[in-house]
Image (spheres, rainbow, N blue to C red):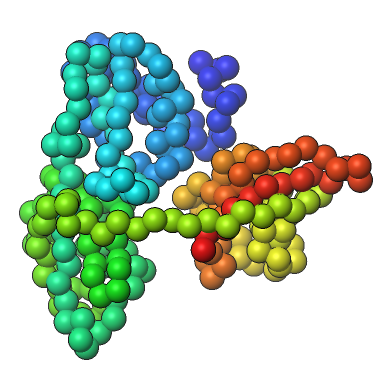
């Protein structure tokens, strides 16, 4: 078990233990276990821990082919998962779009204000005036009853088929740079072209996330595959650590979302 935890960050220990519990449940009960919505890092951990085991397998669904947040289904080898097994709902959010504009952060804020846990809904899909929400099916009644206002706009939820879901493709531009170390503050400074002194206030204000979790320590060491989000600057990812230059700098390959 100790060797297992060495492959992950300390703050991921609780989630790792949870995944092991899910796996053990499937092994002992020989029945499937459906999780709440997981962010991409959590999905990666599940894949890593379940691996190529024959007794327990894992599948993921978030509603569309491009979903970021997904529910995982851990299941015994006899089962063939189907879309219905993931208990997903897609809601169209109706509002007076001629008179008001709604943004992602407002929808997120409204969901938080009604007390809906982040793990109970997936992606918020927005294309122009069209707004959709993927949620856990068990929250249908709660959402219909409680989500009737976003910002100052009255809203109405209509459950629709996933064939009508908005499909959005992420586009990334790839760059390379050199950094003196893999410290988070150094990596952010290199990726976004700002000084390390300017990074610190962003960290202290809770405006930086690494793998979808707020990061406050600039000394945190980045790893390949890390997703970084800095409010006001956009999203990026550490694609590959390419080794050192002759001047002992670290060569970094990274992507930035367009």
Asked whether, in this view, residue 19 is left or right of residue 64, the answer is right
Q: Using the image, determine if residue 147 lies above or below residue 56.
A: below
Disc tally is: 0
- Residue 27, how many percent across, how many down? 27, 12
Rendered image quadrant of residue 29 = top left
Q: Residue at x 20, y 86 (%)?
A: 98
Q: Residue at x 29, y 61 (%)?
A: 125
Say if residue 138 shows up in the picture.
yes
Q: Residue at x 57, y 67 (%)?
A: 233
Q: Residue at x 33, y 11 (%)?
A: 54
- Residue 207, how many percent across, how many down? 54, 63
Q: Which residue is at the far right?
A: 247
Which one is in front, 126 or 216? 126
Say if residue 219 shows up in the picture.
no
- Residue 112, how many percent across, how many down? 29, 61
Asked whether, in this view, residue 168 is left or right of residue 75, the answer is right
Which one is in front, 30 or 53? 53
- Residue 30, how many percent across, how many down? 20, 13
């Amino acid at each position: 078990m100790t060797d297992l935890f060495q492959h992950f960050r300390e703050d991921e220990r609780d989630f790792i233990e949870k995944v092991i519990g899910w796996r053990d449940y499937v092994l002992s009960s020989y029945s499937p276990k459906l999780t709440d919505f997981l962010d991409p890092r959590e999905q990666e951990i599940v894949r890593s821990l379940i691996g190529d085991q024959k007794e327990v397998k894992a599948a993921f669904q978030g509603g569309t082919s491009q979903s970021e947040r997904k529910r995982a289904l851990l299941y015994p080898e006899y089962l063939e998962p189907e879309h219905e097994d993931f208990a997903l709902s897609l809601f169209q959010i109706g509002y007076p779009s001629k008179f008001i504009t709604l943004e992602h952060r407002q929808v997120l804020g409204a969901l938080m204000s009604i007390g809906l846990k982040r793990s109970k809904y997936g992606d918020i899909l927005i294309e122009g005036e069209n707004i959709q929400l993927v949620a856990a099916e068990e929250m249908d009644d709660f959402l219909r009853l409680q989500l009737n206002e976003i910002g100052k706009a009255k809203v109405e939820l209509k459950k629709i088929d996933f064939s009508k879901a908005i499909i959005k493709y992420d586009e990334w531009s790839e760059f390379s740079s050199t950094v003196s170390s893999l410290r988070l503050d150094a990596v952010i400074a290199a990726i976004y072209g700002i000084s390390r002194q300017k990074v610190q206030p962003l960290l202290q204000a809770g405006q930086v996330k690494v793998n979808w979790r707020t990061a406050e320590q600039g000394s945190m060491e980045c790893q390949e595959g890390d997703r970084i989000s800095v409010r006001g600057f956009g999203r990026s990812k550490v694609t590959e650590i390419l080794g050192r230059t002759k001047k002992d700098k670290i060569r970094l390959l990274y992507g930035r979302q367009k």
